[in-house]
Image (spheres, rainbow, N blue to C red):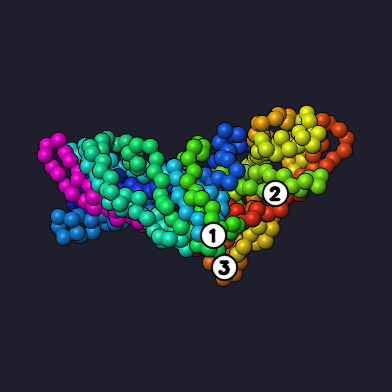
Amino acid sequence: MFGHPLRRIGVLAAVSAAFLAMVVTPAEALVPADVPAVGVDTGRFDLPISCAITLPDVGGVKVFDLGTSVDVQGVVATSLGPGQQFFLSQGSGAITFPTWLTGLAGTVGIDRADATVSELSIGATNATPPSINVTETPQVIKDIVIKPGEPLTVGLPLQGTFDVGPYTAPHSGTVTLKFEQAVAHVTLKASWGLQLKVDATCKPTAGNALLTIAVGGAAGQPPSLIHGAPLNFPPVAPGYLNGIINAPYKCSFGGEQLDAGIAVGGTIPLTVSRTGSMSFTDASGALTIPKATVNKLLDKGFSGSFSGRVTELNLVVRGGTPAVQNVAANVVIPPTPLVRDRDIVLPLPTTGTLSAGPFRPDAGASSVAVSLGSAAATITFNGNAGELPITCGAPSPEVYLVENPVT
């Protein structure tokens, strides 16, 4: 069905080296060490792609299109200032090819491949430039080992991670980061002397948006380049993302304004069917109280420990229904000590998960966007009987969890 065996082998290495991409599923509570700093968005995406496999030595004839997916990780800010420069940092990615492809290699003795990745383009809608080729200096991978009958994983960069940028944000609106295209040139090699050149051009097949970032706040902010964020995500199924986003909140408590962070993690689809719906699975959260806020509470006389309940964490939906959903109506805050000069990262709930969704597209909507809205809680200090309310307005600029195209 795929033609001559040598052509089928060409497909194997072409795709194997045509990797491409840059840049939690919490089964229970979020692990505090995995929660990024306030204002940081981390994620792992598995994006469906299709690679057109061609033979450059015979006029570029296409052998066939191979469907697979690319696994991408990266880090960005939760929002951007007007005209701010920014990067998609700590980027890495890999593509794994199934055993049937490597089995084809063994039929003619192919056991190695050399690959040159000449294009890996990440777009940024509404930003400048609109696209950046991560591999402007082509990445050369020598002697990729092909073991017949075993899955083959090829990753970039060869060492460490890469930063994509700088992009410049617009003065308002949003920026959507996208995987656009990757191109690889591969030479397949057998120990008995066979060398076969193949090319692979890979493009997304079911929506290419990685994430959306809102623009707002003060102009003149320094470039956003984040390093050192945790990226401990397990593999995710094709067409989904795992992520943790820690949104900055301004909260009112006892007449004071306090800074805090509310993190949300979970598995989220990358698209939504026009006649279907989308939900977040294995969802969980965390409350971050920066040490400056801890110190402020201590200076106000709130010493010892606190406990209470989260009564509200609203998700705001545009292009879908319901328009607002409270996903944390009764989440227990366990007794937690206040320690001067020490951040608090408190998983909420401490066990189990939250439910978010289903969200259904509105008639005529081109996308369904879900962002973080207002939050509220009641707390008690040192076990005293009196409960004190805390209210937090929605983050400004807006913090998007996802914006999915309707397919």
Residue lying furthest left in this view?
A: 193
Q: Are marks 3 and 2 in contact (CB under 8 Å)?
A: no
User: Does the magenta-highlighted stretch encompass residue 182?
Assistant: yes
Q: Main secondary structure of the magenta part?
A: strand
Q: SS of the residue at dot 2?
A: strand
Task: Determine which residue is flagged by label 2.
Answer: 250
Task: Determine which residue is flagged by label 1.
Answer: 82
**What span is colored magenta in the figure?**
181-210
Q: SS of the residue at dot 1?
A: loop
Which amino acid type corresponds to the residue marked 2 in the rendered image? Lys
Residue 99 appears in which quarter of the rendering? top left
Q: Earlier in the sequence, mark 3 or mark 2?
A: 2
Picture residue at 25% right of the left edge, 43% below the top: 140
Residue sitting nearer the eye, 23 or 361: 23
Dot 1, how many residues are within 10 Å of its Cα: few (below 14), some (14-19), or many (20+)? many
Residue 141 horizontal/vertical position (percent):
26, 41
**Mark 1 vs mark 2, CA separation in Å:** 20 Å
Q: Where does the N terminus fall, quadrant-wise?
A: bottom left
Residue 106 appears in which quarter of the rendering? top left
Residue 110 appears in which quarter of the rendering? top left
Picture residue at 54% right of the left edge, 46% below the top: 41
Task: Determine which residue is flagged by label 3.
Answer: 365
Q: SS of the residue at dot 3?
A: loop
Dot 3, how many residues are within 10 Å of its Cα: few (below 14), some (14-19), or many (20+)? few
- Tag of residue 20: none
User: Does the magenta-highlighted stretch encompass residue 338?
Assistant: no
Q: Nearer the viewer, mark 3 or mark 2?
A: 2
Q: Nearer the viewer, mark 1 or mark 3?
A: 1
Picture residue at 46% right of the left edge, 57% below the top: 168
